[in-house]
Image: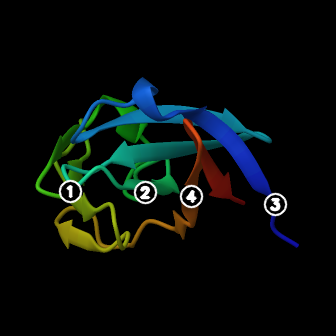
Amino acid sequence: MADWVDACATNAIDNENLIRFDHGGRTFAIYRSPEDEYFCTDGMCTHEAIHLADGRVMNNTVECPKHNGTFDYKTGEALQSPVCVNLKTFPTKVEGDRVLIEI
């Protein structure tokens, strides 16, 4: 059964940006959209296992810093090669000033 995990403070992520969150031996990426919504994906690119936390976030996408493959961080969909495998996404919610993810 999945558990809700306290990942970070809401103000830890700037609008249209992301942070890295490590938990239970896994790496996640948590995003804050321009609409002030929060999203979570696996934190490693599906192409060559590079941390997405160093990637560029723009227009609801994240670009891998190594080969510039692009994902939609809301859905996890791989949008631009060389990435062709979608990112796994995780439900998020805000309680008070905290962002929680369900893993």
Q: What residue type is disc 2 on?
A: Phe
In the picture of the structure, the residue carrying the numbered disc 4 is 93
Distance, label 1 to label 2, CA atoms, is: 11 Å
**Earlier along the polypeptide chain: callout 3 or callout 2?**
3
**Earlier along the polypeptide chain: callout 4 or callout 2?**
2
Q: Against 93, is 26 above or below? A: above
**Earlier along the polypeptide chain: callout 3 or callout 4?**
3
Distance, label 3 to label 4, CA atoms, is: 12 Å
Q: Position of residue 39 (x, y in %)?
A: 43, 57
Q: What residue type is disc 3 on?
A: Asp
* Label 2: element kind: strand
Local packing at callout 4 (Cα closer than 10 Å; few below 14, some 14-19, many 20+) is some
Q: Position of residue 22 (x, y in %)?
A: 65, 34
Local packing at callout 2 (Cα closer than 10 Å; few below 14, some 14-19, many 20+) is many
Distance, label 4 to label 2, CA atoms, is: 9 Å
Q: Is residue 49 visible?
A: no
* Label 4: element kind: strand
**Earlier along the polypeptide chain: callout 1 or callout 2?**
2
Residue at left 81%, top 68%? 2
In the picture, the quarter occupied by the N terminus is bottom right
In the picture of the structure, the residue carrying the numbered disc 3 is 3
Tell me if label 3 and label 4 are in contact, CB under 8 Å.
no
In the picture of the structure, the residue carrying the numbered disc 2 is 39
**Earlier along the polypeptide chain: callout 4 or callout 1?**
1
In the picture of the structure, the residue carrying the numbered disc 1 is 61
Q: In this rendering, which labeled residue sits more in front, label 3 or label 4? A: 4
Tell me if label 1 and label 3 are in contact, CB under 8 Å.
no
Residue at left 21%, top 42%? 16
Residue at left 37%, top 69%? 76
Local packing at callout 3 (Cα closer than 10 Å; few below 14, some 14-19, many 20+) is few
* Label 1: element kind: strand
Q: Which mark is residue 41?
A: none
